[in-house]
Image: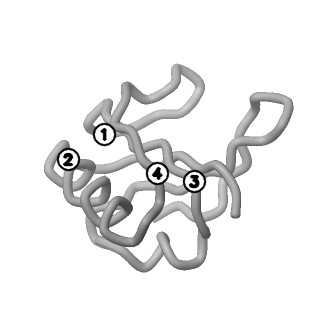
Amino acid sequence: MGDYIATFFSHFGAMSFKKKCEKEGYPATIMPVPRNLSSSCGTCVKFTGEAQTAQNWNSDEVEQLVKILETGSFQVIWHS
């Protein structure tokens, strides 16, 4: 398990993803996208969970999935 941020093409995609995280037992928060990550809608979901599982949710709405590293920087796991 790790900490991740998912960015989206639409706010609706972010809301749906957050609900899916909560349903699966992954703590999740909707927040503005950090400055050094670009996003179409400006909203992201920060969550703790498994990247491989989350990557399959709402794949048409997810713009990118990044791992939050201990240094505070980001590592892109998947990008559409």
Residue beneath disc 2? 10
The furthest residue to the front:
25
Q: Which mark is residue 26?
A: none
At 52% from the left and 78% from the top, the residue drawn is 53
Q: Viewer-nearest of labels 2 and 4? A: 4
Residue beneath disc 1? 40
Is 20 positioned to the left or the right of 49 in the image?
left
Q: Earlier in the sequence, mark 1 or mark 2?
A: 2
Q: Viewer-nearest of labels 1 and 2? A: 2
Q: Earlier in the sequence, mark 2 or mark 4?
A: 2
- Element at label 3: strand
Is 3 positioned to the left or the right of 62 in the image?
right
Residue beneath disc 3? 48
The C terminus is located in which quarter? bottom left
- Whether tag 3 and tag 4 are in contact, CB under 8 A, the answer is yes
At 73% from the left and 48% from the top, the residue drawn is 75
Q: Viewer-nearest of labels 1 and 3? A: 3
The answer for how far apart the CA atoms under marks 1 and 2 are is 7 Å
- Element at label 4: loop
Residue beneath disc 4? 27
Residue 1 is situated, as x and y percent measured from the top left of the image, at 70, 64
Q: In terms of image quadrants, where is residue 70?
A: top right
